[in-house]
Image (cartoon, rainbow, N blue to C red):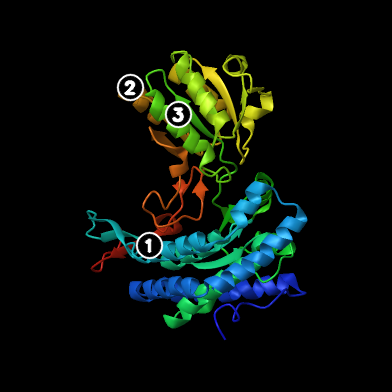
Amino acid sequence: MNAIQAASAGPDDDVAAMMDDLGRSARAASGTLALASSEAKNTALTIAARALRANTAELMAANVLDMEQAEAKGLSGPMLDRLALDDKRIEAMAAGLETIAGLDDPVGRERERWTVPSGLDIARVSVPLGVIGIIYESRPNVTADAGALCLKSGNAAILRGGSESFHSSRAIVACLHEGLKAAGLPAEAVQLVPTTDRAAVGEMLTMTRWIDIIVPRGGQSLIERIQGESRVSVIAHLIGLCHVYIDGKADPAMARDIVVNAKLRRTSICGAAETLLLDEALEDEAPASIIMALLDNGCEVRGDRAVQAMDSRVLPAADTDWDTEYLDAVISARMVAGVDGALEHIARHGSDHTETIVTDDSEVAERFLARTPSAIAMWNASTQFADGGEFGMGAEIGISTNRLHARGPVGVDQLTTMKYLVRGSGQTRS
């Protein structure tokens, strides 16, 4: 029996009992994984990557089932793009696992050490969070990334992928199990909820006995539900309403290339630009050439009156456009009064995800970087780089816009917390 055939069984009639069993076994596995050696975890990831490559045909066959069902349900183009697997994406998943294996182990890392007047030796070290529940929609690669990041950081994972990606995710988890078993680690360290029943999500949100952190990835309605209902702590971002601001001292060619890439490289990711802000100080031809480049590349532009005047193809922007995450080849655009005008717009309409400025003026750039309220602020770079893999973190579970604990790309370091180790020599406190 190969890795795909060994995948988990189907739905259970008693969702509550099934989820309790998953939580109980995840908690047990987390204790083993927290103490696992770096060598064992890296072996599991390396063999899992090998299994992904060896089972490409089976993974593709599972994905075909998901794609057929998704098309029958009438999923949008961007959602279908997120769901689709091909040779390139499967190789990227496998390479991502190997990259994570090559990262330094965050568990047990001594962050700081000092001695206090009482003579106590105190060290702050990184330890796993415990059991992490990841709830996501139609991206099969999240199954591989989330499972691998949790494994490397010593956390057990309970994965609840969307019904659209059920067959693909089950096949991917089977490959992760192959790696875990080969390394002598419990397969229960990475578990996929074996039902598409939505009641399973509700159960996860109340499993405070077994789950330590919930990480949601998906659309606005999913995130709002989880943030509103969860009794378990949540690491999340609501939407990725990313802005590109073109300053009056920007290089026109660079600005054009960055805008087109930020919007159109992949429109369905949370780091895709959704609003373009153009400095009123730009020379007349510069903003028009950027708008023309977007339109000529198949992007719908919805602009204010000044932007509409640049090209007859520009549609009028409604008030709601400034607060819309399109996840499609659509962008809103407006003129603003310099960097302060851009910052004012971002403060009013942004989602604290990612913003970028294009300018040759370092003073203006540093002002933008310092004052942007978002988790990621960039200078002369496409917002599409807002990704843990591109940050050298191997992969990410998501981009957190939380103010507490993790913020920005959530990788292995962000999936640990701290513990204080205090060593004495018989001290008692007076």
Name the residue type under label 3: Arg
The numbered mark, 2 or 3, whose residue comes first in the sequence reads 3
Circles 2 and 1, Cβ within 8 Å, touching? The answer is no
Camera-near label (1 vs 3) is: 3
Residue 99's label in the rendered image is 1
Q: Quadrant of residue 172?
A: bottom right
Residue 106 in picture, x, y percent from top left: 35, 62
From this viewpoint, is residue 371 visible?
A: no
Residue at image mark 2: 361
Residue at image mark 3: 256
SS for callout 2: loop
Q: How many marks?
A: 3
The residue lying at 60 percent from left, 14 percent from top is: 309
SS for callout 3: helix
Camera-near label (2 vs 3) is: 3
Q: Tell me if residue 148 comes above or below residue 54 in the rendering.
A: above
Label 2 CA crowd tier, 10 Å (few <14, some 14–19, many 20+)? few
Label 3 CA crowd tier, 10 Å (few <14, some 14–19, many 20+)? many
